[in-house]
Amino acid sequence: MTISLVRVDDRVIHGQTTTRWTKARPCYGILVVSDKIHADKLRRRVLKAAAGKYKLGIYTEKQSPDRIQKAIDSDKNYFLISDSPQNFASLLKAGVRFGDELNIGPMNTRPGTKVLGRTVAIDEEDYTAFDYIESQGVKISFQLLPDDEKKSWASMKKKFDSL
């Protein structure tokens, strides 16, 4: 089937993911790409519990190209989620194609970020990653929930530049 949702979400898997997004997009399992999460045993256990009935794989950036391709080649639908846009930029640089749209969910306030709206705060590294991702033909849509209006990277970039 396919990767039915590609998303940046700093909480990765939570109630909105397993209730709202899975109703809007078909999902059999969730692939998480993050070296940081992969190395954190406690966070992996928390995410496994949060995934509930959905199959879950948590992979490093190095492991993920093969896993993503297997998901694309399977007869099931998967969500591909990371806690950072830099991970998706790295995947693209490595030649991994995961779809034509990247959904941006919560990216909450962190040191050095500019707040752009409801649950969206980005820094220069995020900005650079978003620019690269979009330059590779991947549309970036900021959308917390499936029913929310999508905001484009162009509009969010303009806001970032004005702050």
Image (cartoon, rainbow, N blue to C red):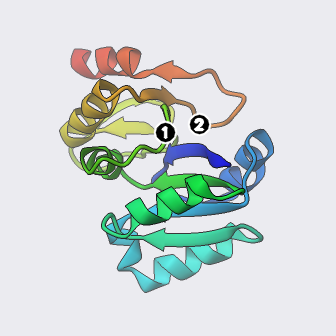
Task: Give the residue type at disc 2.
Answer: Leu
Going 64% across and 55% down the picture, which residue do you hit? 78
- Residue 7 rendering spot, x and y as whole percentages: 51, 45
Whether the residues at callouts 1 and 2 have beta carbons within 8 Å, the answer is yes
Which mark, by number, is residue 97?
none
Q: Write the residue at 65% across / 59% down.
A: 74
Circle 1 sits in a helix, a strand or a loop, which is it? loop
Classed neighbour count for the residue bearing mark 2: other residues with Cα under 10 Å, few (<14), some (14–19), many (≥20): many
Identity of the residue furthest to the bottom in this view: 41
In the picture of the structure, the residue carrying the numbered disc 1 is 119
Q: Residue at x 48, y 76 (%)?
A: 43
Lateral position of residue 10 relative to residue 122, left or right: right
Q: Amino acid at mark 1?
A: Thr
| Above or below, 121 relative to 58 | above
Task: Quickly name the residue at label 2.
Answer: 144
Q: Is residue 20 left or right of residue 116?
A: right
Please provide percent x and percent y for residue 46.
57, 77
Near-viewer residue (126 or 28): 28
Pick whichever, 110 or 86, lies toward us. Answer: 86
Residue 35 rendering spot, x and y as whole percentages:
32, 69
For the C terminus, give its image quadrant. Answer: top left
- Above or below — where is 82 with respect to 47? above
Image: 106 above or below 31:
above
Question: Which residue is farthest right?
Answer: 23
Sequence-earlier tag: 1 or 2: 1
The spot of residue 139 in percent (x, y) is: 44, 25
- For disc 1, the neighbor class at 10 Å (few under 14, some 14 to 19, many from 20) is some
- Cα–Cα gap, marks 1 and 2: 8 Å
Of badges 1 and 2, nearer the viewer stands 2
Q: Secondary structure at mark 2?
A: loop
Q: Which residue appears farthest toward the front when viewing the image?
A: 73
